[in-house]
Structure formats: structure tokens, C-alpha cells
Image (cartoon, rainbow, N blue to C red):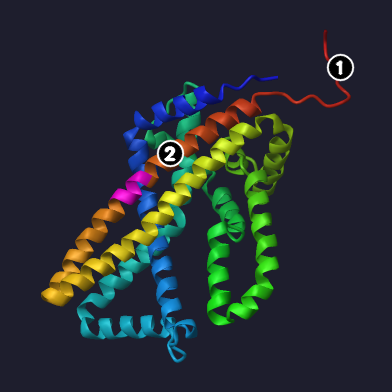
Amino acid sequence: MISMDYKKIIVDSWVYTQSNKKLIVWFGFIPSILTTSVSIYLIAYQIFAFKKSYLFGDDEGSALEEVVFFLWDFLNAHLSWTVPLIIFAAFFGVFYFLYPTLAKAASVQTIARHRNGQESSVGTGMKYGLMSFLQLFEYHMIIGTFSFFSLLIEMSFVVRNLGPVIFKLFIPVFIVLIIISLTLTLLFTYADFFIVIDGKGVFESMKASAKLVVLSWKHTFLITILMLLIGVRIFIQTIMVFAIPALIIAITGYIATVTLPVTGLVIGGIVGFICLFLAAYLNGIIDIFSYTVWTYTFLELTSEKHLSARETVKQ
């Protein structure tokens, strides 16, 4: 039975994270820019949609309609921007859907190879990360349906479009879905690592992860710490996601009332980009640190052989 030194894993993970700035930039900061930007847009849209809903007295308002008309009017007024914006949107969309998954696969490969004394450069991690990218992407597409953030979006859609009365009827359903989401998150804790490090298939990795979690129940304390780390990351990201659009709107609105609207937009945009980059870098550090802790833990747990009831223990 392995005696795991939880404190050493946490300390070693933090030291490794701080000494690998390239890892933070390429596999933490850049994907965080993408995910944080999209999260800000989703939250801002939800706020705008609630404001335009009948809950706030705008029975004839439609957030989606206003967004579409705004984009249409903007493109009509700036025809020369149409093609560049479409190209940028397509590039950003493809990059957003693919790169965060590839970055996680590459970072786990880099961390695991460093832990085992192998070559562990950013290029090496990217090379081997590509080999497990498709399986990891498929797994993320499957499990993403049950993510807590997805459930929040679904809950806001119900209360905004069907009303508080109908929403109350759906509360038991959402509670069950949240419990299922948390349970699956716990059981599939190591699925990413079975896919990336051991090269297992998607469903085989999910099964292996659930088995490892059950067999390693004595390490619940460590799992709890790791879940708290992820909780801290989500909390920080949520604060940033809410704060950035609020800050942009507040600064732009204030400056627009005392000076030219264009000046307000420019200053609000600059402040927003600065906040976005700071939030992305902070989230990038937390991501790499979290990946390192999970990878070290996975390597420790999978190095232990679990005996079946049929095997005889030599005295």
C-alpha cells in the first residue's frame, strides 16, 4: 500500500508550475484567453437577455434579435470589415473548440514525462499530446453536456423563457442533474489521464477512472483538496467573468456621459483587454498547477497494484 505524501505533492506541483513559465504561457494562458473570452460573452449575453425578458418588464424584447440586428447594422456600416471579421470569427471559433483540449493533453504529457525523468519540453508535450487529442476531444464533448456551467445556462434559459413558476417545477430535476454532474466529475477524475498518459479509449478510460476512484477511497482527503483547488479556480474565473463586462460597461457609460462616446469605448476596451489578460494569466497558472497535482496523483495511484481476492499475499 502506497503512503502518499499529500503535502509534498502540492509543494512539488507548485514549484514545478512556477519554474515552467513556457508551460504556463502556451498551455495555460493562451487557452485561458479563449475560454475566458467566451465565458465573458456568455455571461454578458445572459445578463442582457434577462434585462430584455419579461421579468424586467420588456415583454416585446428579444436579446438574440437585438444582437443579430446590431451585428447586421454594424457590418452594413463597415462593409470593408466584413471579410476580416468573418475570417477572425472562424479562426477564433476553430481555435476555441480545439486548442484548449490540445493544450491540456500536451501539458499532461509534459508534466508526466518530467516526473518520470524523460525529455519534457513544450514541443515534446505538443508532439505526444497530438496523439491523444481526438480521444480527449471526444471525451470532453461527452462530459461537457453535464458540466456545472452548462447546467447554469440551461437553468437561466428556463427561468427567462418559461417563467419562475415553471422553473420551480423543474428545480427537483435540476437538483438531480447537479448531483449527477458532481458524481460524474468525481468518478471520471482520472479519465483525462488514462486517455493522455496510458493511451486508453474514451469509455475504457471512464471505466478505469471510476474504478481507480473507488479503489483509492482512502485518498478522499487528497481528492477533496483537489476539488477545492478546482473550486477556487472556478470562483476566481467567475468573479473575473462577471467583473470584466461590468467594469467595461461602467467605464464606457461614465466616460460617454462626460465626453465623446468614442473615447469612452476606446478607454473601456483598453481596460477590458488589460483585465482579460490578467484574468487569463492567473487562470493559466491555476490550470497548470491543477494539472500538475492531478498528474502526480494519477502516477502515484496507478503505480500501486490492487490485488484480487483470489491472489495470495506472500508473508
Residue 127 visible in the current orientation: no
Residue 304, located in which quarter of the rendered image? top right
Mark number, residue 49: none
**Which quadrant of the view contains residue 208?**
top right
Quadrant position of the C terminus in the picture: top right
- Judged left or right of residue 229, residue 177 is right
At label 2, counting other C-alpha atoms closer than 10 Å, the crowd grade (few under 14, some 14-19, many 20 or more) is many
Q: Residue at x 53, y 60 (%)?
A: 149
Circle 1: residue type? Thr
Residue ranking furthest to the top:
315
- Residue 184 lies, in percent from the top left, at 66, 50
Of 214 and 34, the residue lying toward us:
214
Residue, far left: 259
**Residue 117 percent across, percent down from the top left:** 47, 21
Q: What residue does disc 2 label?
A: 288
Expressed as whole percent of the image width and height from the top left, the position of residue 173 reads: 69, 67
Residue underneath mark 1: 312
Q: Disc 1 or 2, which lies upstream in sequence?
A: 2
Is 204 one of the magenta-colored residues? no
Q: Residue furthest bottom?
A: 60
